[in-house]
Image (cartoon, helix red, strand yellow):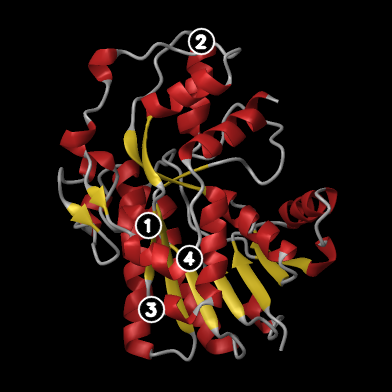
């Protein structure tokens, strides 16, 4: 049987790269989208990029948190052999943390797993997009000098997750991932499961960006520096680890291709990133761009706030070299300024 891959949340930042790479590798792809307009738009983008758009189709899933959200999609496509669950909210502009962040992440994951169990009769592999947030949290939640790896878990509780949107996002990723591993432990499904845990995801959008006023949440790290240069304002100074979006997409594909990835968490981090590092790369490679001068007193002290990531296990499983920060920043800036 040929491999047909289902990608939930197919219009997302990471998911679009996954769809593109799958089509380049001659897979047939079915994506879930929230409306026919979004599905047709994605199809046209794929065709305009010279990809085999005839190998892409879509199913409408308006609300991943609705009971049985993915049932009809999988009933219609018994040929699906791989299910990549990327759909989950990643933004902080919310009024109701539980309704807008926790519920979609938890119930969306449960719905996907239940649909695969009931209607994915040919599904052999499942890959779920989680986050570094499920492993240890971002910079201000990390423990200085502590090494974290694929076995680490963020100690955040559901109660703590409800405090604000930032904690809500972090909690949503941990709680949703715990549902995955609990499901595997309880149901012992016939399909192999892998989870992908990226750090800050940088890198260009899959297709040219028309509206550059606001990019996806993590790429606002770069866009914010460019906007601050124009406005003569101060960008938010952050510190953490990064991974390029193209490597995140590739990791999802390698995860279902390799037996070694079954039952594993894949911690994706190419190296450290700070606002200052990004600004210095832009300054060197785009000398024509007006940039802000960072306030020295606001610079984070890496050694005091950031844990140390050891993802040697992940690198060994995946077997490919990650894109470095300079290329990731340069490709992103080129897309924004052009």
Residue 27: where, in percent of width, then height?
72, 72
Element carrying mark 4: loop
* Mark 4 crowd level (few <14, some 14–19, many ≥20, 10 Å Cα): few
Tell whether 68 sits left or right of 43. left
Give the residue pinned by disc 1. Answer: 102
Tell whether 182 sits left or right of 43. left
Residue 105: where, in percent of width, then height?
43, 61
Checking the image for residue 319, the label placed there is 4
Give the residue pinned by disc 3. Answer: 263
Give the residue pinned by disc 2. Answer: 231
User: Marks 4 and 1, how far apart in space?
Assistant: 33 Å
Quick check: can you spot residue 67? Answer: no
User: Marks 2 and 3, how far apart in space?
Assistant: 48 Å
- Counting residues from the start of the chain, the first of labels 2 and 3 encountered is 2
State the residue in front, 327 or 78: 327
Element carrying mark 1: helix
User: Marks 1 and 2, how far apart in space?
Assistant: 35 Å
* Comparing labels 3 and 4, the label whose residue is closer to the camera: 4
């Amino acid at each position: 049987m040929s491999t047909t891959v289902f990608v939930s949340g197919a219009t997302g930042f990471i998911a679009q790269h996954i769809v593109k790479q799958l089509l380049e590798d001659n897979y047939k792809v079915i994506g879930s989208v929230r409306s026919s307009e979004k599905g047709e738009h994605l199809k046209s983008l794929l065709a305009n990029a010279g990809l085999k758009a005839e190998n892409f189709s879509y199913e409408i899933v308006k609300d991943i948190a609705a009971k049985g959200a993915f049932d009809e999609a999988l009933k219609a496509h018994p040929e699906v052999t791989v299910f990549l669950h990327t759909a989950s909210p990643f933004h902080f502009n919310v009024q109701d943390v539980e309704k807008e962040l926790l519920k979609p992440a938890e119930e969306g994951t449960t719905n996907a797993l239940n649909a695969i169990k009931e209607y994915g009769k040919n599904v052999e592999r499942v890959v779920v997009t989680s986050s570094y947030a499920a492993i240890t949290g971002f910079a201000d939640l990390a423990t200085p000098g502590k090494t974290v790896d694929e076995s680490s878990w963020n100690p955040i509780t559901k109660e703590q997750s409800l405090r604000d949107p930032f904690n809500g996002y972090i909690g949503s990723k941990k709680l949703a991932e715990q549902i995955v591993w609990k499901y595997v432990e309880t149901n012992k499904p016939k399909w192999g499961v892998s989870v992908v845990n990226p750090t800050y995801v940088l890198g260009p959008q899959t297709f040219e960006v028309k509206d550059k006023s606001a990019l996806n949440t993590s790429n606002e790290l770069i866009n914010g520096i460019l906007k601050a240069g124009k406005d003569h304002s101060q960008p938010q100074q952050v510190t953490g680890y990064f991974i390029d979006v193209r490597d995140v997409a590739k990791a999802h594909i390698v995860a279902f291709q390799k037996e070694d990835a079954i039952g594993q968490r894949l911690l994706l981090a190419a190296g450290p990133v700070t606002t200052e590092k990004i600004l210095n790369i832009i300054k060197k490679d785009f000398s024509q761009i007006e940039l802000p001068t960072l306030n020295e007193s606001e610079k984070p002290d890496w050694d005091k706030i950031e844990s140390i990531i050891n993802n040697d296990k992940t690198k060994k499983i995946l077997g490919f070299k990650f894109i470095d920060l300079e290329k990731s920043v340069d490709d992103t800036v080129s897309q924004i300024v052009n």
